[in-house]
Image (tube, helix red, strand yellow):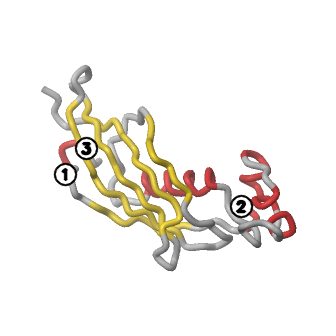
Amino acid sequence: MIHYEDLNIGDSVDLGPTSASADEMVAFASRYDPQPFHLSDAGAANTYFGTLAASGWHTAALTMRLMMTGRDEPLASLGSPGFENLRWRRPVYPDDALTARVTVADKRLSKSRPEMGLVQFEVETRNQDEVVVMSFVSTSMMARREPD
């Protein structure tokens, strides 16, 4: 597993690709984000999107999966207190090939929990044309190999 000590500020990794079919996008949107442009081409026809587009929350879920399963070794994650600056920058369409570039922006030891450190990741999700479709900053609680 990748622990707190294994990550250095500036480390970057590209993960993926992953994608979602039109059926997967509609199923997700039907359950979690039933806006017309996420449900059908007809519902998106006269909108900014023009055709069926993924929910941003679906894009975030795909990115999270890459972050947790896209490495040769899993992260020793203990969860997250949250994220900041979530931006959906461009639409994601059926079968777009998405990759996530994850960069260690900062890290520090926890003051109250010696078994963990906090790692701040800058995340950019890109499509097959290298266009950033989503970005955010995530703070992860990471297990330490040998707590003090």
Q: Earlier in the sequence, mark 1 or mark 2?
A: 1
* Left or right of residue 139: residue 57: right
Is 57 above or below relative to 116? below
| Disc 2, SS | helix
Front position among marks 1 and 3: 1
Residue 101 horizontal/vertical position (percent): 38, 63
Mark 2 — residue?
24
Q: Nearer the viewer, residue 18 or 53?
A: 53
Mark 3 — residue?
3
- Give the amino acid at mark 3: His
Front position among marks 1 and 2: 1
Residue 29 horizontal/vertical position (percent): 74, 53
CA separation, marks 1 and 3? Answer: 11 Å
Crowding at dot 1, Cα within 10 Å, few <14 / some 14-19 / many 20+, comes out as some
Mark 1 — residue?
8
Residue 58 horizontal/vertical position (percent): 63, 54
- Res 92 → quadrant: bottom right
Crowding at dot 2, Cα within 10 Å, few <14 / some 14-19 / many 20+, comes out as some
